[in-house]
Amino acid sequence: MCNNIKKEGDLNTLLYSRFANPMSSSPNTSNLQVNSSHKQILSIALPISASILVPQINFITNNIFLGGLGQEALGLAGITGVFYLIFAVIGHGLNNGLQSLISRRAGENNIEEIGNLFSQGIRIALAFSLIGILLTWLVVPALFKFALHDPLLVDKAVSFLNIRIVGLPLLFVYQMRNALLVGTNQTKYLIIGTATEAVTNIFFDYGFIYGKFGLPNLGFNGAAYASIISEFAGLAVLFILIHVKGISKQFQLFKYWAFDWINIKLILKISSPIVLQYAISIISWEFFYILIEHHGARDLAVSNTMRNIFGFFGCFTWAFGATANSMVSNLMGQNLNDQVPVVINRIMMWSASMAIFVCIILNIFPTQVLSIYGQGPAFIEAGIPVLRIVSMALILMSVSVVWLNSVTGTGNTRVNLYSEFAAIILYCSYVYIVLEHLKMPIEWGWLSEVIYWVTLFIPSFIYMKSGRWKKLAKY
């Protein structure tokens, strides 16, 4: 892997000679460099946690409202939700790559280039969102007819996704905004945008799904319209906020309208392995849910609630992962490579501690957690064994995600991609044999999460411990 990176040294050298000049920043701009203290870690991670947590609350609220339409609707939300998540994580991959680059420029105090990177990131994100919309409209009907057993389920899923996918450009631009705020250590502003999105989503969810507040009764599709409206509201508030706070002026966000092919290539070079990694990860999860659908409506509904739980309590893990990405890149931009292992270990400690606490709570109160979906005793009885497995997987994820994002912060995202390929091959092979061939209970299928996170952790840990990331050409 390192040899492949070294072969691209000429491009890296060119890019670095153009952009990595700390003196290009204005003397009046604030210092964006970070340190490896626990206070610094929490100051970045906690606002990110809140910003991720609020959308997950939205998602759980969606599922609680949809659960009121019956178990079939709750299960269908799992299939459509994971499909949309494929495109959402593509935007998240662009977010991570752009965030890594912005964090590096922040570490160098190269303020001028941050606005340019952001502008080019928006261009790429909008192009990707258009492709996502066209693929959904043209491919999904045939794909779901082939994969799902229930024709009525197919029609409902296609109708929902044809509406939901229209919000993809809003989501992608929102994610690029997040990359800017995290990369420049201004994570506190994320909370305001996500809180706006949460309140809007809950209001329109309840209104559209059940026909309340004078709104039309749209049933299952109401959740799609509510999500689009809430994404627009959150994005609008965030745009207003960064304008009022002077962030747009500080980083000259709207100065660079011309195409900058060097920066576009740089963003794609760093982001594309992450995008591909995330995409194949969620595609494999969609494969998992299709296999679960073959087991019946109840098992599909149980698995959808597990995804809710994984997403909600995993917010802290993903926040610490984003913190690792940003801080590793920032420290490398300051040439403080000796501080990188220190900050990774400290972030991992916080992430694992939070996950262990969550695991204990879930195992003490499993019935109370599952009862919020209102699906009855049989549903709770089927869900408890799966919940115990998911709670253990959350601990493995808390460690793996930090190391994985630390690799992203170094810029060698190919390590992540190769790790993902290995993990997905093992994951898909396991779930197919267990769920489709052996027809075992779904809790055995959910053990695949243990295989997945361990497989991702090992190469990331070995790579960071090897120190080879210190020899990479700067970007």
Image: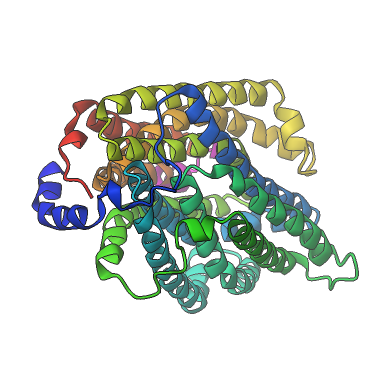
Magenta range is 432-443
Can you tell which quarter of the image residue 237 is in? bottom right
Residue at x-position 56% and y-position 70%? 165
Residue at x-position 51% and y-position 25%? 39
Task: Assess whether residue 428 is covered by the magenta stretch.
Answer: no
Where is residue 244 drawn, in percent x and y?
63, 58
Where is residue 471 drawn, in percent x and y?
15, 37
- Residue 69 or residue 322, whichever sits in front: 322
Can you tell which quarter of the image residue 241 is in? bottom right
Where is residue 126 drawn, in percent x and y?
45, 71
Residue at x-position 65% and y-position 53%? 193
Of all residues, the one furthest to the front in this rendering is 27
- Residue 170 or residue 458, whichever sits in front: 170
Q: Can residue 356 be seen in this view?
A: yes
- Residue 340 or residue 134, whichever sits in front: 340
Q: Is residue 411 above or below residue 243?
A: above
